[in-house]
Image (spheres, rainbow, N blue to C red):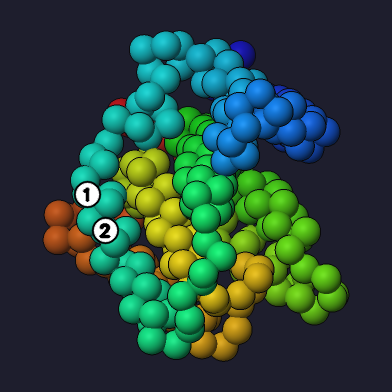
Amino acid sequence: MDKTLKVTLITLLSFGAYFFLDELYFKSARTWLHSFINQYGISHIISYLVFGIPIFIGVLLLHRKEGFFNSLGFNRSIIKAMVFSLLCTLPMFIGFAFIFDFNSEVSLNTILISVIAAGFFEELYFRGFLFGQLFRYSRFGFILSVLLGALLFGFAHLYQGNELGEIIGIFLVTFLGGILFAWVYAEWNYNIWVPIFLHMLMNLSWELFSVSDNALGGIYSNVFRIITILLIIVLTILQKRRKGIGIEVNKKTILMKSKNWLQHRV
């Protein structure tokens, strides 16, 4: 079987199984676990892990156990990812601290669910698996590889909105966020820790201060978020130029890659 076809089928079927089961049974499974564990955040994390089993099976089918961690980007530098993410998100933490009040309602469950679980599992499943397998191991270019995941990522956050304008804004913010996290994942040599820490820290800054009840935010919050995004893009490009490494997402990889492209991948 053609490698692109194999990667595409296994990736889409595995992610589809995860997404379908998650939509139908996640909340009830979390409630059931909570009745035993009596800790909502931990129940949320365990549920996320269990419903990711179809994805883990897909990775094993594609790469076997020997390539499991490498194919998802886990074997890259955690320290570099953390330092880069902290540097890029500083404007959000500093700006929010000056403009907004500290959120007195933040709790352990907030950190476990909205920061740790959201940042880790959303990046692992949407970027490391759905986007990463298609872009890294098939001939699909960046646009074709990222589009489905970004759309689903945007739709998954629509519950935060009430009015039409707000819903559209939330979709656009999260859709574009999905594209940004996928791009930075690819440009940092498929280091999944980079989008994970960026996602966690951006969410943490949003939760620590009374910024907004949803992902859309207001004028001031988006000013500092845009500064963070610009830092992510500029610093990523600068560090690649400093090392003499070409940009991963370029005119040769934007739509479809050449037939011999996969032969030169490590």
Q: Residue at x 45, y 87 (%)?
A: 99
Which secondary structure lies at badge 2? helix
User: Where does residue 249 sit, x and y in percent of width and height?
Assistant: 42, 54
**Residue nearest the viewer, comparing 16 with 3:** 16
Q: CA distance from mark 2 to mark 1?
A: 6 Å
Q: Residue at x 52, y 61 (%)?
A: 106
Task: Please determine whether, in this image, residue 79 is positioned above or below residue 47.
Answer: below
Neighbours of disc 2 within 10 Å: few (<14), some (14-19), many (20+): some
Task: Please determine whether, in this image, residue 234 is positioned above or below residue 125.
Answer: below
Tag 2 and tag 1, C-beta contact below 8 Å: yes
Disc sitting over residue 84 in the figure: 2
Q: Residue at x 66, y 68 (%)?
A: 214
Q: Which residue is mark 1?
A: 80
Q: Quadrant of the C terminus?
A: top left
Q: Where on the picture, by quarter, is residue 25? A: top right
**Residue nearest the viewer, comparing 32 with 217:** 32
**Residue nearest the viewer, comparing 100 with 51:** 100
User: Where does residue 92 sit, x and y in percent of width and height?
Assistant: 40, 74
Q: Where on the picture, by quarter, is residue 14? A: top right
Task: Please determine whether, in this image, residue 185 is positioned above or below residue 25.
Answer: below
Q: Residue at x 57, y 88 (%)?
A: 219
Residue 84 visible in the current orientation: yes
Q: Where on the picture, by quarter, is residue 263? A: top left
Which secondary structure lies at badge 1? helix
Residue 180 visible in the current orientation: no
- Horizontal side of residue 75 vs 208, given as left or right: left
- Horizontal side of residue 20 vs 261, given as left or right: right
Task: Please determine whether, in this image, residue 16 is positioned above or below residue 215.
Answer: above
Could you tell me the amino acid type at mark 1? Lys
Could you tell me the amino acid type at mark 2? Phe
